[in-house]
Image (spheres, rainbow, N blue to C red):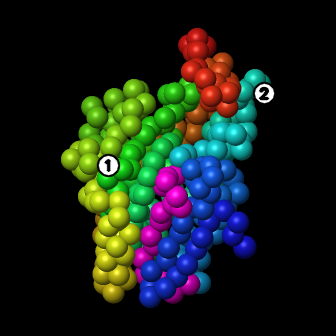
Amino acid sequence: MAYEHILFDVADGVATLTINRPERMNALHIGVIAEMIDAVDKIRDGLVDARVLVMTGTGRAFCSGADLAGGGAGGGGGGSGPVDAGKVLETHFNPLLERLFALPVPFVTAVNGAAAGAGCSYALAGDIVVAGKSAYFLQAFVNIGLVPDVGSTWMLPRLAGKARAQAMMMLGERIPAETAADWGMIYKAVDDAALMAEVGAIAAKLAKGPTRSYALIRQGIRDSLDKTLTEALMVERRNQLHAGRSADFAEGVTAFLQKRPAVFTGK
């Protein structure tokens, strides 16, 4: 597959996947996700000589989530009638997350800016998450009348605790990188200028380490968390179906595209 929306490079055992839509703050649509899945599958299937995966974004964002203007949240809203906002989760977004969790190599995220919505999930899915101090994490779903998805309801309570995770999701507030580090959501926050050097050093160490042991550590930690990720994804997908059919979702997307505050009615 030729890549239009991502950059993918492998050198010295380190695969680097960079979401490359800086003009859209690296927002995701089906085409972007398909390319990301293809790259991750190359690592999974041993088609490239990678012993660690690093994911980051181009420009001032890691990933701003689904591309609402490009139909990334289900292709609807904005007055187009009821849609199944969960369908694209089932076909694209969730399969990518499950692939990242199941990788046989370590996965490191370099969060260089905004990590919102699905971008927040992919950022926090890293085994080791390092963020620049200007970066932030945002569960923005409530701002357009949707519910958290792409594993957010499974990951965030485990990382930050129920109280913080629930407030983060219900208030839709930005969590700065240094706060995320204090909460235990991420490994560390570093100066922006030092981010890629810091991640590069970590990746180089992992690329030279016991890859099979890393794979077992990853799987062991997931197993210890009661093996409910897939169940949580199914619940999110069902809830997203209902949320995506609401008038508030249509209003939220319309307001977003028109760059005005949304007026929600609770319907």
Give SS at disc 1: helix
- Quarter residue 264 falls in: top right
Drawn side of residue 8 relative to residue 134, left or right? right
Give SS at disc 2: loop
Instruction: Please determine whether, in this image, residue 116 is positioned above or below residue 53.
Output: above
Work out which residue is located at the far top of the displayed protein and give it: 265
At x 42%, y 76%, the residue is: 52
* Residue picked out by circle 2: 80
- Which of the image's four quarters has the C terminus? top right
Give the residues drawn in magenta, as a range.
48-63
Work out which residue is located at the far right of the displayed protein and give it: 80
At x 57%, y 28%, the residue is: 144
CA gap, disc 2 and disc 1? 36 Å
Q: Which numbered tag is attached to residue 244?
A: none
Badge 2, how many Cα within 10 Å: few under 14, some, many 20+? few
Badge 1, how many Cα within 10 Å: few under 14, some, many 20+? many
Instruction: Please determine whether, in this image, residue 54 is positioned above or below residue 98.
Output: below
Work out which residue is located at the far front of the displayed protein and give it: 193
Instruction: Please determine whether, in this image, residue 228 is positioned above or below residue 249.
Output: below
Along the viewing direction, whichever of 257 and 8 lies nearer the viewer: 257
Please tell me whether residue 60 belongs to the stretch shown in magenta. yes
* Residue picked out by circle 1: 177
Instruction: Please determine whether, in this image, residue 138 is positioned above or below residue 225.
Output: above
- Which of the image's four quarters has the N terminus? bottom right
Mark closer to the observer (2, 1): 1
Along the viewing direction, whichever of 114 and 221 lies nearer the viewer: 114
Q: Position of residue 163 (x, y in %)?
A: 27, 31
Drawn side of residue 82 relative to residue 161, left or right? right
Q: Earlier in the sequence, mark 2 or mark 1?
A: 2
